Amino acid sequence: MITKINITEMGRIDLGEITKHNIRLVRRLNHSIFPVSYNDRFYKDVLEAGDLAKLALFNDIAVGTVCCRIELADNEKRLYIMTLGCLFTYRRLGIGSTMLKHVLECATKKGVDNIYLHVQINNTEAIEFYKKFGFEIVDTKEDYYKRIEPSTALVLRKQMHHQQNSN
């Protein structure tokens, strides 16, 4: 099932389900987009993530992915963005924003306290992208990444503000 999300002057952006039929495509996209390799366990988790994992389509062409998970820690319900990215030639068309808006909607529906992710310290484009959506740098993790340089990651977090029910 594909959810029609956004029509821009450049084309149509859809977010589709990730299934056993397209997981190899997700693997290939991630390999092209990210400097990190993900193991089989990651892709098994993606298949079980439901709405927290989506395939981004631009005019019916698979161009990106977003994969998240919910974590419970320190008396908080957090949403961790494991991956969110699109192919270089399709950047600046609203695809990343569409995926992140989907994540924000999921976080709101699931009542999470905050959303966080790791970004390689030299990825200024990603850092600025997340800052536009209200994420803040909250920590630096030395030697977070294995087998890539620089190995340092920034932790970005966005606090979610829940609306109180008024009776």
Image (cartoon, rainbow, N blue to C red):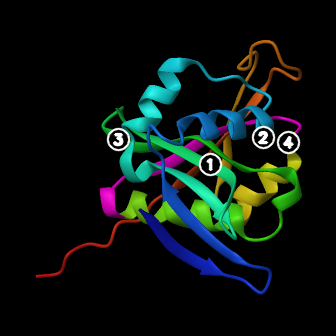
**Label 4, residues with CA under 10 Å away: few <14, some 14-19, many ≥20:** few
Image coordinates for residue 15, horizontal then vertical, percent? 54, 63
Q: Amino acid at mark 2?
A: Ile
Kindly tell me whether residue 3 is visible in this rendering.
Answer: yes
Cα separation, mark 2 vs mark 1, equals: 9 Å
Q: Nearer the viewer, mark 4 or mark 2?
A: 2
Residues at badges 3 and 1 in contact (C-beta under 8 Å)?
Answer: no
Which numbered circle lies on residue 48?
none
Q: Nearer the viewer, residue 61 or 103?
A: 61
Image coordinates for residue 12, horizontal then vertical, percent? 67, 77
- Mark 4 or mark 3, earlier in chain: 3
Cα separation, mark 4 vs mark 3, equals: 28 Å
Q: What segment carries the magenta color? A: 109-122
Location of mark 3 (residue): 76
Q: Is residue 97 above or below residue 49?
A: below
At x 79%, y 24%, the residue is 152
Please say whether residue 113 is one of the residues in the magenta stretch. yes
Image coordinates for residue 23, horizontal then vertical, percent? 53, 37
Asked whether, in this view, residue 6 is left or right of residue 131, the answer is left
Cα separation, mark 3 vs mark 2, equals: 30 Å
Asked whether, in this view, residue 151 is left or right of residue 54, the answer is right
Q: Amino acid at mark 4?
A: Asn
Kindly tell me whether residue 113 is visible in this rendering.
Answer: no
Location of mark 1 (residue): 65
**Quadrant position of the C terminus in the picture:** bottom left
Q: Nearer the viewer, mark 4 or mark 1?
A: 1
- Mark 4 or mark 2, earlier in chain: 2
The local secondary structure at tag 1 comes to: strand
Location of mark 4 (residue): 123
Residues at badges 2 and 1 in contact (C-beta under 8 Å)?
Answer: yes
Residues at badges 4 and 3 in contact (C-beta under 8 Å)?
Answer: no
Location of mark 2 (residue): 33
